[in-house]
Every structure is written in C-alpha cells, then in structure tokens.
Image (cartoon, rainbow, N blue to C red):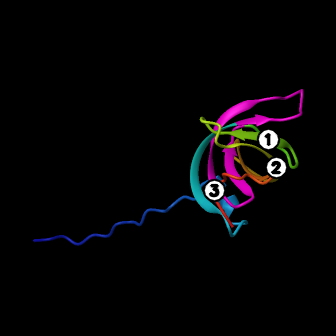
Amino acid sequence: MAKEGTASARLSQTSIVGRLAKFLPQATPVRIPVTLTRVGRESGAFSENTVIEFGTPREVLFASSVPLEFSETLRLQNSDSSLDAEASVVAVQYHNGRTAVAARFTREVANWIVKP
C-alpha cells in the first residue's frame, strides 16, 4: 500500500549579486573568472580572484570579500587577458561580510560578450 506524503519545496536562494542584478534589467547571467585589482589607490591596494556573475553591455556584477566604495576604479582581467578593462564602482550592497558590486566600464570594451 502506497503512503501519501508531502515534500517541502526547496527555497531557491538568490545570491547577493543576484539581488543587486535586479536593479539592472539588462543584466544577463555570465560566469567569468577574473582577477580584480584596485587602481590608483596606494593605501589599501589589493588584488583578489572573483567571478563576474552578471553583465550588461556596460556593467559587470560580482562579489568581493573586500568592502569597495562608490566610484573606486578597478581593473578586471581574465586568465588569458582577452578581458583587461577598467571599471568604476557604481553600486554596492553589503551582506554578512561579503560585498556585491556593480561596476561600469570606463571605456567601451570591444570584445565584451554582452552586447546591446
């Protein structure tokens, strides 16, 4: 004899970056590992590996373990340097020691995969 039962639905958790992406309607999910480096700031210079999780034709969204500030300039570089661009922080959200960041390219990136 079969038993009836109920299963609880899994709650899909939106990442901190996904929550920030909701403010950019053009944001497309991507997964691009990059090295992130702070530019033009002698004190507090850092470099870290992260993943671009969303992109628009002009912006990238990623998580950082370092709190970044509005208008900071960053360099984003992938492993083969096909992406080597500067971007300026345009939005941040902090949550449990992590920072979700949206940064806008300072110049047009000819080989950027997200096109208008």
Q: Position of residue 13 (x, y in %)?
A: 54, 58
Label drawn at residue 103: none
Residue matched to label 2:
89
Q: Distance between the Cα atoms at labels 1 and 2?
A: 8 Å
Instruction: Name the residue type under label 3.
Output: Phe
Q: Please tell me how crowded label 1 is: few (under 14), some (14-19), or many (20+) other residues with Cα within 10 Å.
A: many
Q: Secondary structure at mark 2?
A: strand
**Foreground of the two, 89 or 85:** 85
Give the magenta range. Answer: 36-65
Q: Please tell me how crowded label 2 is: few (under 14), some (14-19), or many (20+) other residues with Cα within 10 Å.
A: many
Specify whether residue 103 is in view. Answer: yes
Residue matched to label 1:
74
Instruction: Name the residue type under label 1.
Output: Leu
Q: Distance between the Cα atoms at labels 2 and 3?
A: 14 Å
37 drawn magenta = yes
The quadrant of the rendering that contains the C terminus is bottom right
The quadrant of the rendering that contains the N terminus is bottom left
Residue found 63% across the figure and 56% down from its top: 54
Mark found first going from the N terminus, 2 or 3: 3
Q: Is residue 2 above or below residue 106?
A: below
Residue found 86% across the figure and 43% down from its top: 72
Q: How many marks?
A: 3
Residue matched to label 3:
54
**Foreground of the two, 24 or 4:** 24
Q: Position of residue 53 (x, y in %)?
A: 61, 52
Q: Is residue 44 above or below residue 29?
A: above
